């Protein structure tokens, strides 16, 4: 019995790639568009390495019925175009929430306590020469605002509770059963806190949400941590705010034009920069890959994905 044909948009981790090839006939887009068999490809597996998956690509695959995304965020997929063509989009929620939340707390602590800078100080031999590393700011007594209290945001909040800090949040609506104070806008939240943790989805609705006004409201002792999407932050405004003291520091795991990081950010000492590793543990990436494969297998077997995104509801 022949295996179903799928198109892989970009390379996946080796374990995931091997599992895909065991279950499906995999055509590799990065090796060239498989024009001769395009009409037989009914599903596509994609990830952040591919970039934007637009209507033009969907139209090149006339039998396409499922786009299985490796990751929770799917803002790089034109879901409106997919929905208009009856294509279901799936993602991988749940399996990476705790890992990203762990990374978020690590990035927050590294940013406030200046851990990378302290390590560079030691490696440069300055401590051995008797030069003490300067005292850092602290997390003690701070109020943390979470911009986007979804599954990851809630996981971050649970961890923060153990640090004894006050927590507040902004989302589109106030959530029932949530005890943290809610603020009606990102600007209002930033004005009430001195740490802003960004975990909202990417896409047009949140593009530039954290702008110069929000950064100014966060204030000169303010710390920004972004583990969401780079598009959520006005990077030019952030560079200016870090350079002129509008805010104290920032920790960033994501950027607007990955893998390119603005040189001005690289030149600043009050920012901690990571290469988009929020979910980047072996166990979590394997779990993400397995859920993507499970979505593909379920769709081929039943016509339904296990975790479809809400914009592309399944028939029946």
Image (spheres, rainbow, N blue to C red):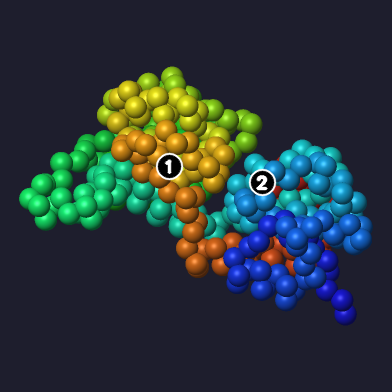
Residue occupying image coordinates x 77% and y 38%? 80
Above or below for 136 versus 306: above
| Residue 141 place in picture, x, y as percent | 22, 37
Residue 229 is at least partly visible in this image: no
Residue occupying image coordinates x 63% and y 68%? 16
The kind of secondary structure element at disc 1 is strand
Label 1: how many residues lie within 10 Å, few (<14), some (14-19) or many (20+)? many
Asked which quadrant contains residue 102, the reply is bottom left
Q: Taking 244 as reference, is 8 left or right?
A: right
Mark carried by residue 51: 2
Query: Do the numbered discs 2 and 1 sit on residues whose CB atoms are within 8 Å?
Result: no
Mark carried by residue 58: none
Above or below for 47 versus 202: below
Distance of mark 2 from mark 1, alpha carbons?
20 Å
Residue occupying image coordinates x 60% and y 47%? 73
Mark 2 or mark 1: which comes first in sequence?
2
Asked which quadrant contains residue 39, the reply is bottom right
Q: Which residue is mark 1?
A: 252
Q: Taking 85 as reference, is 75 left or right?
A: left
| Residue 15 place in picture, x, y as percent | 60, 72
Residue 46 is at least partly visible in this image: yes
Which is nearer the eye, 95 or 173?
95
Q: Taking 278 as reference, is 62 left or right?
A: right
| Residue 171 place in picture, x, y as percent | 51, 33
| Residue 126 place in picture, x, y as percent | 15, 50
């Amino acid at each position: 019995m022949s295996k179903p044909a799928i198109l892989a948009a970009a390379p996946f981790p080796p374990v995931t790639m091997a599992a895909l090839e065991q279950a499906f006939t995999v055509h590799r887009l990065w090796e060239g568009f498989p024009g001769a068999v395009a009409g037989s490809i009914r599903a596509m597996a994609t990830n952040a390495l591919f970039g934007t998956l637009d209507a033009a690509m969907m139209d090149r695959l006339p039998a396409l019925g499922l786009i299985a995304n490796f990751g929770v965020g799917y803002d790089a997929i034109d879901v409106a175009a997919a929905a208009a063509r009856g294509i279901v989009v799936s993602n991988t929620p749940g399996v990476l929430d705790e890992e990203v939340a762990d990374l978020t707390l690590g990035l927050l602590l590294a940013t406030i306590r200046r851990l990378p800078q302290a390590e560079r100080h030691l490696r440069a031999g300055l401590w051995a020469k008797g030069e003490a590393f300067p005292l850092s700011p602290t997390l003690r007594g701070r109020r943390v605002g979470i911009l986007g209290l979804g599954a990851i945001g809630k996981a971050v909040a649970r961890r923060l509770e153990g640090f004894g800090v006050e927590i507040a949040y902004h989302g589109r609506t106030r959530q029932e059963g949530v005890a943290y104070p809610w603020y009606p806008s990102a600007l209002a939240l930033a004005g009430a806190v001195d740490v802003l943790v960004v975990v909202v989805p990417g896409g047009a609705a949140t593009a530039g949400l954290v702008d110069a006004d929000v950064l100014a409201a966060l204030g000169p002792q303010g710390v920004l941590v972004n583990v969401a999407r780079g598009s959520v932050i006005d990077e030019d405004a952030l560079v200016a705010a870090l350079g002129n003291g509008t805010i104290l520091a920032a920790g960033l795991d994501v950027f607007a034009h990955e893998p390119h990081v603005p040189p001005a950010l690289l030149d600043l000492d009050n920012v901690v920069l990571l290469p988009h590793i929020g979910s980047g543990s072996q166990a979590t990436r394997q779990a993400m890959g397995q859920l993507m494969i499970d979505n593909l297998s379920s769709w081929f077997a039943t016509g339904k994905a296990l975790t479809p995104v809400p914009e592309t509801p399944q028939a029946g």
